[in-house]
Amino acid sequence: MEPAENGLHVGLIMDGNGRWASARGLRRTEGHRRGADAVRRAVEAAPGLGVTTLTLYAFSADNWRRPAAEVSALMGLLESFLVRERAGCRRRGVRLALIGRRDRLSPALIRAIEETERATRGGARLYLRLAVDYSARSAILAAAGDLGPGEPCDERGFLRRVNRACHSDPDTPPVDLVIRTSGEQRLSDFLLFEAAYAELLFTDTLWPDFDGEDLRRAVEVFRRRDRRYGGLARDEGDRAEPTRADLRGSAPGSRRPTTRSSVPQSGVSVGRLTGVRPPAGAPAGPCRSFSRGPG
Ligand code: FPP
């Protein structure tokens, strides 16, 4: 599938609210409250950075396992965010939608969602999707279950089905960049189909500290990445063409041509995450992806 033609789709896994609060001797719910402020900063910064779709992971289907008081605080924060931000979103051209299940949410929260979706549906600068009670695997399963037996479906058509299955605009483009804060490096059931070719970026910054400048840096790192979609780097097409000597050398037991595409790519490395090559001899391992200060 092609990347978005008219702007970037960024997915944000907002992690680290609890640790941010614990480090300050505060309750976890205070971390979430400050996390909501960071949401506002990201939403304000996104359009100016060429981001036209922003998907924020606010509550996963697995987050119901948290203590009831924390779940209730999170739901309350979501509701007040929707009510409070409604007019501002409308004014700034932000179309807001909730993706995920709705049948386990309170009637008051559903009302707030529906009213905000209605009030902001004309927004054309930014499509803001809040993922709540969301599971990518469930969305994929629902989309697959919706296909009739033997019904043909290509990747683009299936993406539309996945989008529809989680109540998104069916035309929502695939994800270009997934950012996860707090140093954790996993996708946690977030946009698994949509992010098939997304660039991944992990930062140690805890979500409540994330701001517009962090988003700007992340987009800058993204723009330096070489997205090959399984092909070759733009400047490498000619060099990678196998020579006759390469082809002769590819007989069993002989050395294979070592074009970039023939070398198995290992997992993530410090260089790929930062967009900067690691110093020679630098140990592989946990990385800081992009930092707020120099270096
Ligand atoms: C993960 O941090 C964060 C969440 C499960 C909730 C995200 C919610 C917000 C950012 C605030 C409300 C959202 C909106 C859209 C108003 P964590 O609690 O797992 O942190 P930890 O890993 O440090 O414990």
Image (cartoon, rainbow, N blue to C red):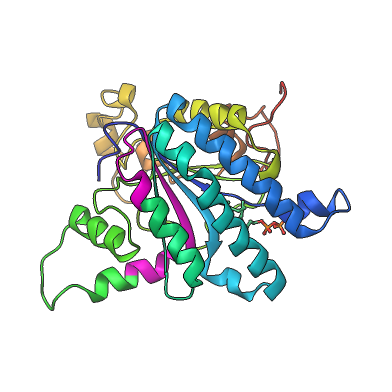
Identify the residue at image location x=80%, y=52%: 21
Residue 79: % across, % down: 55, 58
Residue 39: % across, % down: 58, 43
Residue 213 in view here: yes
Image height of 205 relative to 112, above or below = above
Identify the residue at image location x=57%, y=39%: 40
Image height of 139 relative to 29, above or below = below
Of residue 67 and residue 181, the one placed in the foreground of this image is 67
Identify the residue at image location x=35%, y=63%: 166
State yes or no: residue 16 in magenta. Answer: no
Q: Judge left or right: residue 151 versus residue 290.
A: left
Of residue 271 and residue 196, the one placed in the foreground of this image is 196
**What's the magenta region?**
118-140
Identify the residue at image location x=55%, y=36%: 42
Q: Judge left or right: residue 289 versus residue 177.
A: right
Give the quarter of the image for residue 9.
top left
